[in-house]
Amino acid sequence: MNYDQAIKLLTSQGKFQINLSLERIEAVTKLLGNPQDKFKIIHIAGTNGKGSVCAIIANILKHGGYKTGLYTSPHLVNYTERIKINGNEISKADFSKYISEICTLAEKNNINLTEFEILTAAAFKYFADNNIDYAVIETGLGGRFDATNVIKSPLLSIITSISFDHTDRLGNTIEQIAGEKAGIIKENSIVIVSKDNKGYEVIKKTAQEKHSKLITVNKDIETAFENGNNYAIINENKYPFPLLGLYQKKNLALALCAINYINNITENAVIEGLKTLKWSARLEYKKDKNLLIDGAHNPDGALELKKSLDYYFKNQKRIFIYSSLKTKDYKQISNILFNDEDEVYFYEFNHKNKLSFDEFKQSAKQLKHLYKFTPSMLDNLMQKDCLKIVTGSLYMIGELYPKL
């Protein structure tokens, strides 16, 4: 099986679905010899910020001398982005090999895996085969029935900020959503969470029920933006930290709290881990084009993006390229994110659940400068003397990313 064949299988009618359950992933990982039990795991759930927390921790561990696996989702351009060791993506050849192995094993044993379950099993097997020291694992959706929750005894569990997203599957109250996220907490484990997390009380109660130690982070790590450069302020010292976003203060505090529980991480490993950090499409700023790329696809993400725009790029004229899936709260996102004078170019990107331009137009009648975007317009828009922001669905950003 080559890479294209592997992708075709993953995205086929039978695999490309969401079917939250641990039964199938438990069956296939057992047949694989439970590879997820063969290395130390930091397991991270939440609505927003979990990818950034994963990236920070993994990069610091790498600079600390540990062989570190990182499993995240979704990807922007290639599926191989989801599975990395020490920052290096799995090769397309290895990716195809592991996907083929997992699918063949599942088929022989009548296990009907979803796409995410196949990817999760492949990541665990790949990490085990490469004898990693640590894996930093991001949940896909929720926590309790997420495929990654086949993990039995994580070294640490972290729950990032919780807000409304995937309400059709996780519940329509913060308490219900927090309960699903808190499902990653295991017996006698360690859980890290911010005190101002909206689901804090639910997480605290779950930790108590599981006899787990709850580490509460009460203070964010401050940052400073000076002369186009961003810094983290740690113990009154400034260190380069390329991730923009006021919300990164909270993510950084969670990540550094977790690092405190890892042995032999030097201050220099932390400094280098922060300095060399890259996390695409999360307030990613390309200074030469005055272009900002950010996957704000729910109201809380949009609010944080708006705060950051007003902080970092105050008084700059803004042009948005925006898109959304039908399942997202695009009306609220629009009300939060766009000012009256902004130009908004809406893109009907290539996805079966994409929102159409006409549907968006009906919901955003307040926008005075709304246009339908096509990729042929991109070059002209990039040449305009103003801040360009590409935001919304990560699927759309992935489609445009190579052109940006």
Image: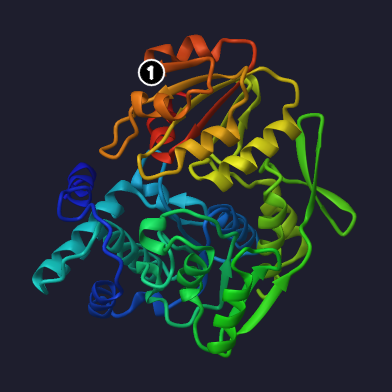
- Residue nearest the viewer, comparing 177 with 141: 177
92 vs 173: above or below = above
* Relative image position of residue 83 (x, y in whole percent): 41, 55
Residue at the location (22% across, 47% down)?
11
Q: Is residue 188 left or right of residue 77?
A: right
401 vs 47: above or below = above
Residue at the location (41% across, 36% down)?
324
258 vs 95: above or below = below
Q: Is residue 37 left or right of residue 115?
A: right
The quadrant holding residue 310 is top right
Residue at the location (60% across, 59% down)?
161
Q: Is residue 97 left or right of residue 396?
A: left
Q: Amino acid at mark 1?
A: Pro
The quadrant holding residue 55 is bottom right
* Relative image position of residue 99 (x, y in whole percent): 24, 58
Residue farthest along the right direction in this orientation: 236
* Relative image position of residue 51 (x, y in whole percent): 53, 54
* Relative image position of residue 180 (x, y in whole percent): 45, 70
Residue tagged by mark 1? 375
